[in-house]
Image: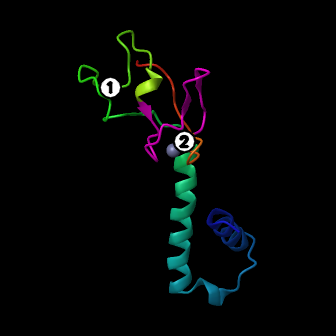
Amino acid sequence: MNKYQEALDILHGFANGNLTRETTCDYQREKNDEYKDILQELVAKATPKKPSFDKSWEYEEIKDIYNEDGSINEIICLCPNCHKHSIYDSEYGVRFDYCHECGQALDWSDEE
Ligand SMILES: [Zn+2]
């Protein structure tokens, strides 16, 4: 079972009153905070983030991910979470909704 499922199952148990009073001691409260952090991680991944600028890009005149017209230049984008190039298929010109490496949701909207 992965850690997200485990955290969800435990919290679900509390919500349904399946766990007894003894389990709501300090230790359990500490665990609850841990489960909350774990689920928070999922929420963060499901919340679309803008791609990061690949700082290793060789042309110094390029300073961020936007072209002059405010559109995103996918080639110089990295996943904002795992910093890999697994967010764009350069061969087919496809922007992925989620990073294929870590599952981070992506926001490809152009500059405002
Ligand atoms: Zn990623």
At a point 32% along the width and 30% down the height, the residue shown is 57
Q: Is residue 56 left or right of residue 7?
A: left
Please report the bounds of the magenta region as a residue range. 77-98
Please identify the quadrant where the N terminus is shown. bottom right
At a point 55% along the width and 73% down the height, the residue shown is 32
Q: Is residue 26 above or below residue 32?
A: below
Please identify the quadrant where the C terminus is shown. top left
Q: Is residue 95 above or below residue 13?
A: above
- The residue under label 2 is 47
Disc 2: CA contacts within 10 A as few (<14), some (14-19) or many (>=20):
few
The part of the image, by quadrant, that contains residue 22 is bottom right
- The residue under label 1 is 64
The span from disc 1 to disc 2 (Cα, nearest Å) is 22 Å
At a point 51% along the width and 70% down the height, the residue shown is 33
Local SS, label 2: loop
Q: Any magenta on residue 32?
A: no
Q: Which residue sits furthest left? A: 60
Q: Nearer the viewer, residue 83 or 41?
A: 83
Q: Is residue 110 above or below residue 36?
A: above
Q: Which residue sits furthest top? A: 69
- Whole-percent x and y of residue 65? 38, 25
The part of the image, by quadrant, that contains residue 18 is bottom right
Kind of residue indicated by mark 2: Thr
Badge count: 2
Q: Earlier in the sequence, mark 1 or mark 2?
A: 2
- Closest to the camera, between mark 1 and mark 2, is 1
How would you classify the magenta stretch by its main secondary structure? loop
Kind of residue indicated by mark 1: Asp
Q: Which residue sits furthest bottom? A: 22
